[in-house]
Structures are given as structure tokens and as C-alpha cells.
């Protein structure tokens, strides 16, 4: 994660980061890793965990609340009944994910503004990015995955994904060892046969033939050749670029997955080279 933070310049001096804590394995891991990084980093930044209680049937947020208290976290729990709205809006048999995500996003953006956060951290990992890439390719007819950082449309926040290069299997193992109090989801978690599940199954099948398939696909997202695509707008931008801005590409046959070139392009102090913990 620290390599991703450094390579994409996700954190800067004075940042106030709202960490979206859903109660799942990914968000717990994200908050813990960022907290550890905060103690060690050569820059000072602030973390505030925000959990959204969506008033789902059977919801019990006490374990999450106790975990936050025991970890001396700065946090806030927001309560809004999005569950009923999503169930009413989504036709029977359709996925809850899109409607639920839109409602959550609006609530969390308002919380970030109230807390005066300039960045919002999400717990998406490598497998999320690859599944999104395949879903867009197969069902939406576009090449699009998940960026490590982007600016919201209104320009108020930077949304960051520090774990976007982390493998889900590693997060699962870590979460099991850490014994996080996982909160079940009665919306998306209650549905089966979703397209995203099919993408996971496809990747698992491909991995049986090529154990490195997920690493190779992640590498492909970092090695785009605009001149070999059919998007006319992309081609115009590519052709109009300054010659010195042409990124270096690996030579034919070079299959290394090194991130040295990305990390070396940044002038900020490296968070990968962590020194002794310091108070901030």
C-alpha cells in the first residue's frame, strides 16, 4: 500500500482524510494500514473514520463502535435509512449496488465537507479494479477500471484508493489474523448471481491456467498504448502531445512488473522508505 501511496502521490502534508469504514474486511484493513503509515510517514496528515449506518434489518454496529474506541480512532457514525430507499427503488431481481452506491456517496460527501476533509479514502483493492474492468468491457462496451486517485466532479475532494494494487487474498488473510468484527451487509451481500460474482469466477478460472493472471492484468492497466486503440479522442490527445511527454515503454519481451519507474518519477519524500515511528 505504501508503494501505491508514494507512486501516485495519494497523501500530502496537511491532508485530512476521511476513511470510509463500512465494517467489511477491506475498510478495516485500510484504516489500520493508514493509521500505521501515519505514525511512520515523513509527512503529517489526519485521519477520520466515518461509518454509515444504513438502518438495515438486524444491523448491530456495537462491535465496530467498540473496535474504533479500542483503537483510539477519530471517528463519526452517520445514521440514515438508505436501506428502505434502495429496496423501494430497485426492481425485483436487479442489483442493489448502483442505487446504494449513489445514495452512500452523497451522504459521505456531505460528511466530508462538514468534517473539512479534503480527501476521501476507499477500500477498493486490485480484484475490485480488475472485475470493474471486465464488467465495463463485457457489459458497458468501454475500457474503464478504477483509478488510484480522482477529483470529484464538483472539485471539492480527491478520492483515493490506497489499496488498489493489493491482492484481495492478502486482505482476507490479514483480516482473519486481525479478527476484525465484520458487519454483514443485507443489501448487496444478500444477493447472488451478480455480474461481479461472475467476473470473480472468470478470473479464478483463468488463474488455474495462469497463476499470475491478476498481476499481469494489473500491469496491463499501467501499460496502455493509446496508438493501438480505436478511440478517436484518445488518438487526438496522443498525437498532439509534446514529444518529450511520451512515456517510456518496456522493450518487447520485457514482462517485469517493476514499479520503480513510477516511484522514481515523484519528487515527494518516499513513504515506502519508512523510518522510525514519530508522533504527528
Image (tube, rainbow, N blue to C red):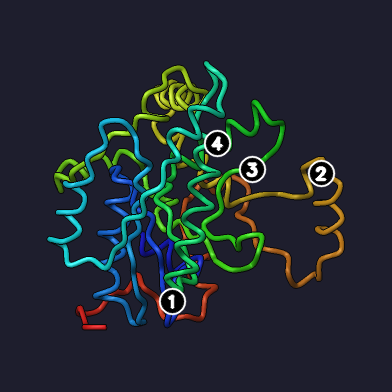
Give the mark nearest the N terminus, 2 or 1: 1
Give the mark nearest the N terminus, 4 or 1: 1
Give the CA separation, mark 3 to mark 4: 20 Å
Q: Which mark is residue 144?
A: 3
Q: Which residue is mark 1?
A: 15
Give the mark nearest the N terminus, 2 or 3: 3
Give the CA separation, mark 4 to mark 2: 29 Å
Give the mark nearest the N terminus, 4 or 2: 4
Q: Quadrant of the N terminus?
A: bottom left
Q: Which mark is residue 231?
A: 2
Callout 4–callout 2 Cβ contact below 8 Å:
no
Residue 41, compared with residue 22, is above or below; it is below
For image coordinates 34% across by 35% down, the residue present is 56
Q: Quadrant of the C terminus?
A: bottom left
At label 1, counting other C-alpha atoms closer than 10 Å, the crowd grade (few under 14, some 14-19, many 20 or more) is: some
Mark 3 residue element? loop
Give the CA separation, mark 4 to mark 1: 30 Å
Q: Nearer the viewer, residue 226 or 278?
A: 278
Mark 1 residue element? loop
Q: Is residue 265 left or right of residue 188?
A: right
Question: Horizontal and vertical percent for residue 183?
Answer: 25, 39
Amino acid at each position: 500500500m505504501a508503494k501505491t501511496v508514494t507512486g501516485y502521490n495519494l497523501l500530502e502534508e496537511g491532508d485530512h482524510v476521511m476513511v470510509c469504514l463500512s465494517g467489511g474486511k477491506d475498510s478495516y484493513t485500510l484504516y489500520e494500514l493508514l493509521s500505521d503509515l501515519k505514525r511512520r510517514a515523513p509527512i503529517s496528515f489526519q485521519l477520520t473514520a466515518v461509518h454509515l449506518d444504513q438502518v438495515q434489518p438486524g444491523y448491530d454496529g456495537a462491535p465496530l463502535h467498540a473496535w474504533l474506541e479500542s483503537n483510539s480512532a477519530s471517528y463519526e457514525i452517520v445514521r440514515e435509512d438508505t436501506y428502505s430507499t434502495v429496496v423501494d427503488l430497485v426492481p425485483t431481481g436487479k442489483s442493489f449496488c448502483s442505487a446504494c452506491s449513489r445514495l452512500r456517496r452523497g451522504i459521505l460527501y456531505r460528511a466530508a465537507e462538514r468534517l473539512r476533509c479534503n480527501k476521501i479514502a476507499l477500500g477498493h483493492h486490485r480484484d475490485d479494479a480488475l472485475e470493474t474492468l471486465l464488467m465495463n468491457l463485457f457489459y458497458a462496451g468501454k475500457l474503464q477500471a478504477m483509478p488510484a486517485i480522482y477529483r470529484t466532479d464538483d472539485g471539492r475532494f480527491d478520492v483515493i484508493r490506497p489499496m488498489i494494487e493489493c491482492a484481495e487474498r492478502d486482505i482476507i488473510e490479514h483480516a482473519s489474523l486481525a479478527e476484525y468484527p465484520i458487519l454483514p451487509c443485507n443489501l448487496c451481500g444478500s444477493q447472488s448471481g451478480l455480474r461481479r460474482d461472475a467476473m470473480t469466477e472468470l478470473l479464478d478460472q483463468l488463474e488455474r491456467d495462469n497463476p499470475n493472471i491478476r498481476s499481469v492484468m494489473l500491469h496491463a492497466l499501467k501499460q496502455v498504448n493509446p496508438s493501438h486503440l480505436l478511440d478517436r479522442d484518445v488518438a487526438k490527445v496522443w498525437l498532439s502531445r509534446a514529444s518529450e511527454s511520451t512515456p517510456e515503454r518496456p522493450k518487447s519481451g520485457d514482462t517485469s512488473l517493476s514499479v520503480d519507474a513510477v516511484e522514481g518519477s515523484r519528487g515527494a519524500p518516499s513513504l515506502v522508505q519508512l523510518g522510525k515511528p514519530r508522533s504527528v
